[in-house]
Image (spheres, helix red, strand yellow):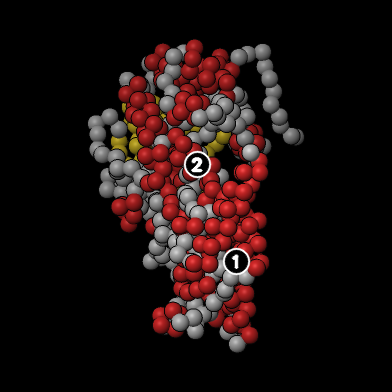
C-alpha cells in the first residue's frame, strides 16, 4: 500500500514534543546528530528543553567535514555551550572521511582532514577541549577498530550507532533532523514500507549495520515540519540559529532556497558560488582544496584567454589531468571545452592515420620531440589546454576563419572576459582587439 502524509488535528510543535516524551520513556539512551543546519539545530534545542523537564541527559554526534562555513563552526560551539547541562557526551568527529566530489569524473571522492593534504586544509584542525570528546585518528575511542581512512560518511554513521548501542547497552534512540517536505528522497526514507519501525511509530526506523539489525532506532522528531515551522520555533522560543542563514537572506535567498550546500556536492557550482558570496575569506581555500589541483584558478577565471595556472597532481596521469582541465573549463565556458575537445579529436585523427591509435598515445615522451611538435603525448595535450590558446597552436593548429567566427559568436556571452592583454598570441590578440572594437561600435549605435 502506498503511504502518504496524513494530517491530524495537532500542530507540529506539540507533535514533536510528544515524540521526545516517547523517546525518553521508551528508550534507555539517546543521541542526536547535528550538522549546524537549521533542522538539526532546532531538533537539538527542543530535545535539550525537554530533557531538562524530564531530568534526562543525552549525547550529541557532530561530524566536522573540514570545508565548513566559519559561521557554522561558531554556531556548533554555541550549541555545545547552550546544551552542556543536559549533554553528557558531545562527540566532535574530525576523521578522514570520503566525501562526494562532483567537480570531477576522474576523482569522484575527496577525503576531509586527510593528513597528506594538511597544507591545503580549509580550516585549522580542531584542538582538544574540555567540553567535547574530540575523535581524531590520534584520539578516537580504542574500540573504533572498525574505522579506516577514506570510510564513507554514511558507513561511519551506521558503525557509530552500533558502537554507541553496544557501549551504552539497552535500547538506543538516534535523532536525525530531517524534514520529509525538504525532498522527495527524504520523504521516501521515512515512509519506506521495507523499514522496521519502533511500535509502528511512523517517525522511526530501525538501524541496520551491514546485515545486522541493531537495538537502535533512528527517530525524526521534525519529519512533518515545514521550513516556516523551523523559523517560527526559532522566533517564538528564542532559539539560537546559524548566522549563515542571515547572510543568505541578505544575499536574496528566500527561506525555501537556503541550504548548507557541500562545496563539492552534486550542485557544485551553486555550492562554490554560495561560499564566495557568503564567506569570501573561506572561498579561495575551498576552491584550492580539491585533490591538490589549483582548481580555483580555473573555476574563478576572470579571462577566457591566457594561461591557466594549474599544476598536475602526482596522483594523476597526464591523460587524467587533461580530462580534468577540460571538465573544469566546462564549468565556466562549456563552449570552449567543446571547442578544445574537437581540436584534440582532430589531433588524434592525424596520428591515427600514421598508425598510432588514441589508446596507444603515450602519457609522455621525449620533451624535445614534444616541443618540436613531432610526437603525440597526453602531456603535450594537457600543456596545450593549460596554454588556453584558442587556436591550439601547440597541437599544430593554426588560426582558421571558422575559429575566428566562433570567437565572435562567443562575444556576446563572454565579452567582459575576452581581453587582448591576457594572451601572448599575436593573432589571438588581434582578434580580441577586433571583438572589443565591435563592442564599442555596438555601444555607439545603441546610444
Q: Quadrant of residue 244?
A: top left
* Relative to 141, residue 376 above or below: below
Of residues 126 and 55, the one nearer the viewer is 126
Of residues 30 and 26, the one nearer the viewer is 30
Residue bearing the label numbered 2: 273
Look at the image and tell me whether residue 36 can be seen.
yes
- Residue at 50 percent of width and 30 percent of height: 251
Q: Quadrant of residue 203?
A: top right
- In this rendering, position of residue 342 left or right of residue 121: right
Image coordinates for residue 334, horizontal then vertical, percent: 60, 56
Of residues 215 and 339, the one nearer the viewer is 339
Look at the image and tell me whether residue 162 can be seen.
no
Crowd class of label 1 (few under 14; some 14 to 19; many from 20; radius 10 Å):
some
**Secondary-structure class at tag 1:** helix
* Relative to 182, residue 145 above or below: below
- In this rendering, position of residue 294 left or right of residue 227: left
Residue bearing the label numbered 1: 341
* Relative to 129, residue 405 above or below: below
**Secondary-structure class at tag 2:** helix
Marks 2/1: CA–CA distance: 26 Å
- Residue at 38 percent of width and 28 percent of height: 75
Amino acid at each position: 500500500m502506498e503511504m502518504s502524509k496524513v494530517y491530524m488535528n495537532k500542530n507540529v510543535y506539540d507533535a514533536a514534543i510528544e515524540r521526545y516524551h516517547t523517546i525518553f520513556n521508551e528508550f534507555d539512551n539517546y543521541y542526536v546528530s547535528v550538522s549546524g543546519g537549521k533542522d538539526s539545530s532546532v531538533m537539538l534545542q527542543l530535545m535539550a528543553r525537554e530533557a531538562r523537564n524530564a531530568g534526562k541527559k543525552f549525547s550529541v554526534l557532530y561530524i566536522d567535514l573540514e570545508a565548513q562555513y566559519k559561521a557554522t563552526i561558531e554556531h556548533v560551539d554555541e550549541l555545545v555551550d547552550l546544551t552542556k547541562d543536559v549533554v553528557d557526551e558531545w562527540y566532535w568527529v574530525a576523521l578522514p572521511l570520503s566525501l562526494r566530489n562532483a567537480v570531477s569524473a576522474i576523482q569522484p571522492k575527496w577525503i576531509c582532514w586527510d593528513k597528506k593534504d594538511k597544507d591545503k586544509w580549509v580550516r585549522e584542525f580542531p584542538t582538544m577541549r574540555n567540553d567535547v570528546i574530540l575523535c581524531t585518528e590520534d584520539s578516537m575511542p580504542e574500540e573504533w577498530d572498525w574505522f579506516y581512512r577514506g570510510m564513507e560518511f554514511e558507513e561511519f554513521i551506521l558503525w557509530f550507532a552500533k558502537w554507541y548501542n553496544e557501549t551504552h547497552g539497552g535500547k538506543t534512540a538516534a535523532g536525525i533532523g530531517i524534514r520529509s517536505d525538504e525532498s522527495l528522497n527524504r520523504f521516501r526514507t521515512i515512509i519506506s514500507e521495507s523499514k522496521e519501525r519502533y511500535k509502528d511509530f511512523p517517525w522511526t526506523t530501525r538501524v541496520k549495520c551491514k546485515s545486522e539489525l541493531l537495538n537502535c532506532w533512528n527517530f525524526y522528531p521534525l519529519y512533518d515540519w515545514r521550513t516556516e515551522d523551523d523559523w517560527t520555533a526559532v522566533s517564538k522560543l528564542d532559539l539560537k540559529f546559524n548566522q549563515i542563514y542571515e547572510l543568505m537572506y541578505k544575499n536574496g535567498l528566500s527561506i525555501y532556497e537556503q541550504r548548507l550546500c557541500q562545496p563539492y556536492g552534486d550542485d557544485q557550482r551553486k555550492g562554490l558560488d554560495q561560499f564566495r558570496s557568503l564567506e569570501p575569506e573561506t572561498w579561495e581555500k575551498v576552491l584550492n582544496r580539491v585533490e591538490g589541483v589549483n582548481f580555483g584558478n580555473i573555476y574563478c577565471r576572470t579571462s577566457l584567454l591566457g594561461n591557466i595556472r594549474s599544476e598536475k597532481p602526482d596522483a594523476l596521469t597526464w591523460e587524467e589531468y587533461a580530462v580534468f582541465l577540460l571538465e573544469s573549463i566546462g564549468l565556466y565556458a562549456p563552449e570552449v571545452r567543446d571547442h578544445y575537445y574537437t581540436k584534440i579529436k582532430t589531433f588524434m585523427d592525424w596520428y591515427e592515420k600514421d598508425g598510432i591509435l588514441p589508446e596507444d598515445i603515450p602519457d609522455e615522451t621525449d620533451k624535445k620531440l614534444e616541443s618540436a611538435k613531432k610526437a603525440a603525448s597526453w602531456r603535450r595535450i594537457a600543456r596545450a589546454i593549460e596554454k588556453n590558446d584558442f587556436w591550439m597552436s601547440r597541437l599544430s593548429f593554426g588560426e582558421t576563419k571558422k575559429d575566428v567566427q566562433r570567437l565572435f559568436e562567443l562575444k556576446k556571452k563572454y565579452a567582459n572576459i575576452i581581453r587582448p592583454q591576457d594572451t601572448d598570441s599575436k593573432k589571438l590578440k588581434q582578434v580580441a582587439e577586433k571583438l572589443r572594437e565591435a563592442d564599442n561600435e555596438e555601444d555607439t549605435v545603441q546610444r
